[in-house]
Image (spheres, helix red, strand yellow):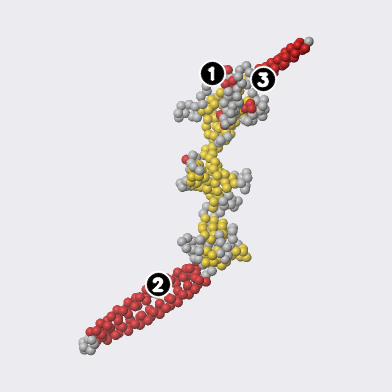
C-alpha cells in the first residue's frame, strides 16, 4: 500500500514539473504592439544652437591719469541730490569724480613762480646785452686813436657774444617753464574725472577715500555703456558648425529672466580669435539686437538659435522613425528576402527607410528621401509618402504597455549591459 502511494506521488510530481516546463518554454510569445506616429505637414527650421552672453554694443573704460585719493563723486544729472553711482545716466562732460588736487595745485603754483623768474632773468639778460653792445661800440671808436689795448677790445667783443647767448638761454628757459606750467594745469584738470561719452554707468570700481595709482597703466574707475538701446550677444559656436554661419544670418535667443519670450537679432561679426577649452575649439559670433525697450540687461546668459534654413509646408516624420529597425521575425513575408537601400550612389539625395504596418505584428519598409532636420523631425519625400501616413517609431509589448523605450519588450538593448545567459536546449526547471 505504501509503495503504491509513493509511486502515485512521484508520478504526480513528474506531471506537474512537465506541465510547468511546457508552460514556460512553449507558451505563445506576447504579441508586440507597434508605436506609430503620423507623417504631418508643417514648417521646418534647421538651426544651430549655442550659448552666449549679452554685452553692450560699445563700452568705454574711464580711468585716471594722475594718482591720488578719491575726494568725492559728481552729481547725478537726473537727481542732483545723489552722487554718481551704478546705473546713473550721464552726458558727455559730466563730472564723475574728483581726485584730491592739493599736490597738483602746489605744483601749478611752483610752475607759475618758476616762469615768472625765468621772465625776470630774460629782462636782466636783455639789459646786459644792451650794455655790452654799447661798450663794444665805444671800444671800436677808440681803435683809430690807439686809446684801447687789443685785450680790452677783445673783451668787449666777447661780452657782446656772451650777453647775446644769455638772452637766447633765457628765452629757452621761458619756453621750458611755460611747458611745465601747461603740464601742471593739465594735471590739475585731470583731478576732475569727466565722462567722455553719453551713456550709462555699468560699473563703479572705486570708493571715496580710495587711492588710485596711475603708473604704467591707467587705473579703471568707471565702466560706461555708450548706448544700451543696442545690445550684442557674444555666442560661442563649435568649430563643426562655424562654417554654416555667415554675417546677416537671422538668429533668435532667449534669456532665463524672461521665460517663453523670444528675442531676434542678426549675425554682425564672426571673430577669428578661436579659443580652446578641453580640446574643444569655439569661435565667438556676435549677434546684434535691438533693445529699445530696455528689457535686456548686460551680461545675461542667452540660449541662441542660428536660423540656417527654413522649409515651409513640408512633410515631416519624427527622427525616431528613421532610427528604428525591426527584427527579422517582424518583417512581412513579402519583404523578408529584400533589403531596402538606405543610401544611394554618391551625389544622390540622402535616402532613408521608414517602416509601416503590413499585417498583424509585421511591418514593411518604405524608402524615403530625407532632407533638412531640426534634431527632432526630418523632412521626407518619395513615392508613397503622404500626409497622415502612420510610421513605426517603436514597440510596446506586454511588459511595456505604454511603449516606453526602456521597457523589456522594446527590443532595444543597452550595449553597455551584459546579455543574460542562454539556457541549453532541453534544460528544464528541474
Q: Residues within 10 Å of mark 2 (few under 14, many from 20)?
A: some
The structure residue drawn at horizontal position 29% and vertical position 85%, both measured from the top left corner, is: 135
Question: In the displayed image of the protein, which residue is found farthest to the right?
Answer: 1
Residue 185 is left or right of residue 19, and the answer is: left
Gap in angstroms between the C-alphas marked 3 and 2: 112 Å
Q: Is residue 271 above or below residue 177?
A: above
Gap in angstroms between the C-alphas marked 3 and 1: 37 Å
Residue 256 is left or right of residue 309, and the answer is: right
Foreground tag (3 vs 2): 3
Percent of width and height locating residue 12: 73, 14
Instruction: Please report whichever mark, 3 or 1, sits nearer to the chain's N-terminal start.
Output: 1
Confirm whether residue 358 shows in the render: no
Near-viewer residue (318 or 91): 318
Q: Quadrant of the N terminus?
A: top right
Near-viewer residue (60 or 227): 60
The structure residue drawn at horizontal position 57% and vertical position 28%, both measured from the top left corner, is: 324
Label placed on residue 176? 2
Gap in angstroms between the C-alphas marked 2 and 1: 102 Å
Q: Which residue is mark 3?
A: 429
Q: Residues within 10 Å of mark 3 (few under 14, many from 20)?
A: few
Q: Which residue is mark 1?
A: 337
Secondary structure found at label 3: loop
Instruction: Please report whichever mark, 3 or 2, sits nearer to the chain's N-terminal start.
Output: 2
Foreground tag (3 vs 1): 3
The structure residue drawn at horizontal position 69% and vertical position 16%, both measured from the top left corner, is: 18
The structure residue drawn at horizontal position 62% and vertical position 30%, both measured from the top left corner, is: 405
**Quarter where residue 206 is shown:** bottom right
Label placed on residue 74? none
Amino acid at each position: 500500500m505504501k509503495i503504491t502511494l509513493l509511486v502515485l506521488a512521484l508520478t504526480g510530481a513528474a506531471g506537474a514539473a512537465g506541465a510547468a516546463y511546457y508552460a514556460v518554454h512553449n507558451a505563445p510569445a506576447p504579441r508586440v504592439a507597434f508605436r506609430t506616429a503620423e507623417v504631418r505637414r508643417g514648417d521646418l527650421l534647421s538651426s544651430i544652437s549655442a550659448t552666449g552672453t549679452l554685452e553692450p554694443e560699445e563700452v568705454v573704460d574711464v580711468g585716471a591719469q594722475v594718482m591720488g585719493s578719491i575726494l568725492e563723486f559728481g552729481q547725478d544729472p537726473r537727481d542732483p541730490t545723489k552722487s554718481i553711482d551704478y546705473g546713473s545716466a550721464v552726458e558727455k562732460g559730466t563730472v564723475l569724480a574728483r581726485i584730491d588736487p592739493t599736490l597738483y595745485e602746489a605744483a601749478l603754483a611752483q610752475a607759475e613762480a618758476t616762469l615768472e623768474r625765468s621772465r625776470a632773468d630774460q629782462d636782466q639778460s636783455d639789459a646786459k646785452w644792451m650794455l655790452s653792445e654799447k661798450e663794444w661800440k665805444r671800444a671800436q671808436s677808440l681803435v683809430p686813436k690807439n686809446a684801447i689795448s687789443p685785450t680790452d677790445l677783445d673783451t668787449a667783443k666777447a661780452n657782446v657774444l656772451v650777453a647775446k647767448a644769455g638772452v637766447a638761454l633765457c628765452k629757452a628757459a621761458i619756453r621750458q617753464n611755460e611747458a611745465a606750467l601747461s603740464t601742471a594745469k593739465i594735471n590739475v584738470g585731470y583731478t576732475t574725472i569727466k565722462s567722455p561719452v553719453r551713456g550709462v554707468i555699468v560699473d563703479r570700481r572705486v570708493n571715496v577715500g580710495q587711492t588710485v595709482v596711475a603708473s604704467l597703466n591707467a587705473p579703471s574707475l568707471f565702466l560706461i555703456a555708450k548706448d544700451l538701446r543696442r545690445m550684442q550677444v557674444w555666442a560661442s559656436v563649435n568649430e563643426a558648425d562655424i562654417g554654416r554661419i555667415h554675417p546677416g544670418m537671422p538668429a533668435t535667443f532667449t534669456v532665463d529672466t524672461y521665460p517663453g519670450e523670444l528675442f531676434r537679432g542678426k549675425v554682425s561679426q564672426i571673430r577669428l580669435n578661436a579659443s580652446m577649452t578641453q580640446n574643444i575649439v569655439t569661435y565667438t559670433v556676435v549677434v546684434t539686437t535691438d533693445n529699445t525697450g530696455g528689457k535686456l540687461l548686460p551680461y545675461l546668459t542667452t540660449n541662441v538659435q542660428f536660423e540656417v534654413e527654413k522649409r515651409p509646408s513640408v512633410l515631416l516624420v519624427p527622427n525616431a522613425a528613421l532610427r528604428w529597425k525591426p527584427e527579422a521575425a517582424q518583417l512581412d513575408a513579402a519583404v523578408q528576402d529584400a533589403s531596402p537601400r538606405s543610401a544611394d550612389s554618391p551625389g544622390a539625395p540622402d535616402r532613408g527607410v521608414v517602416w509601416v504596418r503590413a499585417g498583424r505584428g509585421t511591418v514593411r519598409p518604405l524608402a524615403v528621401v530625407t532632407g533638412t532636420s531640426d534634431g527632432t523631425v526630418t523632412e521626407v519625400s518619395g513615392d508613397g509618402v503622404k500626409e497622415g501616413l502612420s510610421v513605426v517609431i517603436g514597440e510596446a509589448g506586454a511588459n511595456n504597455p505604454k511603449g516606453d523605450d526602456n521597457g523589456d519588450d522594446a527590443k532595444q538593448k543597452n550595449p553597455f549591459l551584459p546579455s543574460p545567459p542562454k539556457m541549453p536546449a532541453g534544460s528544464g526547471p528541474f
